[in-house]
Amino acid sequence: MGSLFRSEEMALCQLFLQSEAAYACVSELGELGLVQFRDLNPDVNAFQRKFVNEVRRCDEMERKLRYLEKEIKKDGIPMLDTGESPEAPQPREMIDLEATFEKLENELREVNQNAEALKRNFLELTELKHILRKTQVFFDEEGGLNHTTESMTRALITDEVRTAGASMGPVQLGFMEKSIEREDYLPCFVAGVISREKLPAFERMLWRACRGNVFLRQAMIESPLEDPTNGDQVYKSVFIIFFQGDQLKTRVKKICEGFRATLYPCPEAPADRREMAMGVMTRIEDLNTVLGQTQDHRHRVLVAAAKNLKNWFVKVRKIKAIYHTLNLFNLDVTQKCLIAECWVPLLDIETIQLALRRGTERSGSSVPPILNRMQTFENPPTYNRTNKFTKAFQALIDAYGVASYREMNPAPYTIITFPFLFAVMFGDLGHGAIMALFGLWMIRKEKGLAAQKTDNEIWNIFFGGRYIIFLMGVFSMYTGLIYNDIFSKSLNIFGSHWHLSYNKSTVWNNNYLQLSPATSDYEGTPYPFGMDPIWQVASSNKIVFQNAYKMKISIIFGVLHMIFGVIMSWHNHTYFRNRLSLIYEFIPQLLFLVVLFFYLVLLMFIKWNRYSAKNDFPMTEACAPSILITFIDMVLFKSSKAPGKDCNVHMFAGQSFFQTIFVLIALACIPVMLLGKPIKIMQARKLANEEVQPITGSSDAEVGGMSNGGGSHGGGGEHHDEEEMSEIFIHQGIHTIEYVLGSVSHTASYLRLWALSLAHAQLAEVLWSMVLSLGLNKEGWLGGIFLTVVFAFWAVLTVGILVLMEGLSAFLHTLRLHWVEFQSKFYMGHGYAFQPFSFDTIIENGTAATGETE
C-alpha cells in the first residue's frame, strides 16, 4: 500500500565520508531534506566536539546579523527578500563573511556612538537655549537684575522671618532686616532643566530641605526633547532657584543631582546672556548639519546591508547546521574518515546517493562516499509524505499522536470524513459560503500571504488550515442544501410537495393547521433534493420533525464511522501478521458492533421503508414502533409492546428470534475479547518451555503479535515476549472493558452531530427574527437607513457568533469524534516523527536544528 495510507518504509544506513568531502556532502543532504542523522557521540559534551569552534564562529556571526537586523528595523528600512535560498558557502568563505560582518558592525557602532554624542550635545545646547530664553523672561518681569536681587532678597528674608518667627526675638529680627544692606548677603541663583513629572516633588524637597529659604521660578518647555540614549520624547521644564549663602548653594546642588536635574551656567548681565544665546544658536545650526550628514551615512550603510541581510542569515544558518550535524559523526582511527548513522526512506536511497556524489565532486575528493544499509530491530521513525493540501490534515492526526511505524494512516480518510461531520453540525448554505470564500481567498493568495511572515499565532493557524476551512465550507454548503437552510430560511427551487386543502376562511381564522400526508395535502413523492421548504414555515411540528431526522442520521453516520475504524484495524493486523489480534480482537469487536448497533441502524431503515401514513393498516404511521424502546427491550430480553391496538409488535417476521441471537452473539464476544488472546499466549509460552527452545519463525507473530512489517523492524505490532502474564491479562481486560463500554458511549457521543446542528439552526433563526426582521419591517426612507444599520449589526453577529464561534465549536467536536470515537478503534499512535536534516525547515524555524533524535 502506498505511503499515502501508511508511512514510508525506512532504512537505517551507515555513511562513510572523507573529511575533505564531508562538508559538501552534508550540505547536499541538507538541500535534499531526506536524511535523519543519529548522534553517535551522546556521552561527549557539546563543548568537546570536533567542530565546536566553527559553531561558535557561526553564533558570533548570527549575533552580528541580529544587531544589524535590529538597527535596520529601527529605521524602518525594508529588507530585500527574493524568496531564493542561496547554497551553503564553502568553509573558506566563512572568513570573508566574518570580515564583512565585523566591518559592518564596527562601522555601525562607531556611527551610532558619534550620533549619540552629537545628539547629547544637541540636547544640552537646546536646553541651554531654553534656559537663556526663559531666564530672560524672569528677569524682565522683575525690571532688571538689581531690582530682582533686592526683591528676591526681601522675599527670602520675609519667608525666613515667617518661618523662624516663633523662635527669634525682636533683636534678632531687626538684625536680619538690617543685613539686607550688606554686600556679602546678596542672593545667588542656579538655573537648569528637570523632567516635568519630577517637578512637584522637586519643589517640595527644596522647600523642606532649605526650610523655605529659596525662591523657585519654573516654566514649561512646550516642545518635547529627544533622549539621546533611547530616542524617547521627554517633556521638561526650566527652573531658576534664588538662595543666599554657600551652605544653601551646596544643599540645592545636591537636591538637583538627586532629581537628575541638569544645571547650566547663566550669566547675570543681560548682554552676556544675549551673547551666549547667539553663540548657542550658531552651534545648534552647525550640529544640525553634522547630525544630518551622520544620519545619511548611517542610512546608506543600513540600506546596503538590508539588501543582503536575508541571504546572509540563510548562509550562516546553513553553515551552522552543517557543523552541528558533523558534530554527530564519529571519526575513524585514522582521523581521515567521518562515520555517520542515519534513517532514510527506502525509496529515496538512490536520490541520496546521487546527492552524495554531487557533494564529493564539488569538494574535489577522489574517494566516493559509502552508504551501507544496516540491519536493526529498532523502531524506525514515522514519515508520511505530505503536500500543501494534505499537510494540515496530517497535522490533525499527529496532534493526537504520531502513528507507529507502518501503521494505517487515518489522514487520507480524514480529508473527507472531517469536513463532512463538521458540515453535519454546521449545515447552512449561507454560513458555509462565507467560510468557503474565506478559505478560497487564502488559497488564491497563499504565495503572498506565506511571504508575509508574522508571529500572530491565530492567523498562522487559520492560514495553515486554509484547505480544511475551504472544504468545511464547501461541505457545509452541501449539507445546507440538504437541510434547505440558508440564514434560517429555505430555497423553494422545485416547489413544495405539500398543498393546502383548507378554504380561505379556515386558514384566516386558525393560527395552527396541520396537513395530513395521508390525504391530498401531500403529493406522495419526496422532494427532489433535500428537505421540503414548507418545513421552514412550520411552527408547531418543525422542531419535532427535524429532531427525529437529525438524531437518526447522527446515529447512522456514527455507527458507520466506528465500523470503518474497526475495519481499519483489520488492515493493521494483516499487515503486521498479528494473527492473535485478528482472531481474538478484530472479529469479536466487529461482531459486537454489527449485531447491536448496525442492527439499530437497520431498524431505522426498515421503519422508514415499511411504515407510512398512506399505507394500509397495520403498516400505518400510528403502528410504527419506537426504535429506542425496541432496542432497550432487545438488550434486556423483554417482549416489546404493540404501539397501538391491533398493531404488530414486530417490524418483520422473526424479529424476536434474531434479536435474541444477536444479543447472545454480542455477549459471547466479550469473553473472547477478554480471555482469548492471553490464553493463547500462555499456551504458546508453556509449549515453548516444554520444548526448551525459543519460539521462532511464524510463531513469533502468532504468540507475541510481533511483526517485521515486511522488513527487519518492529512497527505497529504488539510485543509480549518480556511481559508478565498478569500484565497481559490486566491490559487485555482494560482494553475489553474500554471497547464494550466505549461502543455504547461512543454511539451516544455521535448525537452531538444532532445537538449542534439543532443549536446552530436555532441561533440563526433567533438572529433573523430578533435582529434582521426588525429592519425589514420598517418602511420609507427612514426604514432604509434603519435597515442598513440593522443589517450591519446582523452581519457582525452572524460572522462573529455563527461562523467563528459556532464554527470553532463544531471544529472541536469533530476533532473529538475523530480522535476518540474513530481512531481509538485502530490507531496506536506510539511512533515518533521523522525529523530529517533539512535546510528548508531550519530556515523556516530560524534555528539550526539538525533533526537528531535521541
Image (cartoon, helix red, strand yellow):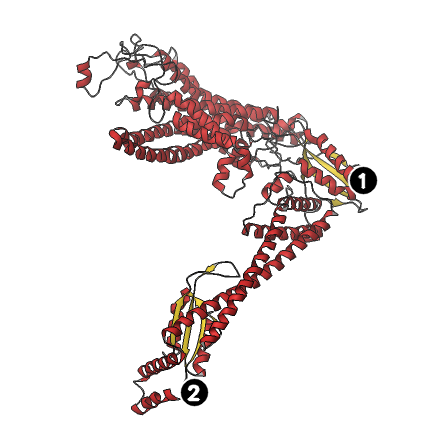
Spot the residue most to the bottom.
Answer: 171
- Could you say where residue 188 lies in the image, as x and y percent from the top left? 43, 80
Residue tagged 1: 365
Q: Is residue 325 above or below residue 559?
A: below
Q: Position of residue 496 (x, y in %)?
A: 32, 14
Q: Nearer the viewer, residue 256 or 689?
A: 256
Q: Spot the residue most to the top.
A: 616
Task: Give the amino acid type for the residue marked by disc 2 in the picture.
Answer: Asp
- 100 and 499: which one is in front? 100
Q: Position of residue 479 (x, y in %)?
A: 41, 23
Q: Is residue 584 visible?
A: no
Q: Which mark is residue 184?
A: 2
Front one among 410 and 150: 150
Amino acid type of disc 1?
Ser
Q: In the rendered view, would you say 438 is above or below 607?
A: below
Residue 599 visible (yes or no): yes
Question: Compared with residue 52, is residue 341 higher up or lower down, i.e. above or below?
Answer: above
For disc 1, the neighbor class at 10 Å (few under 14, some 14 to 19, many from 20) is: some
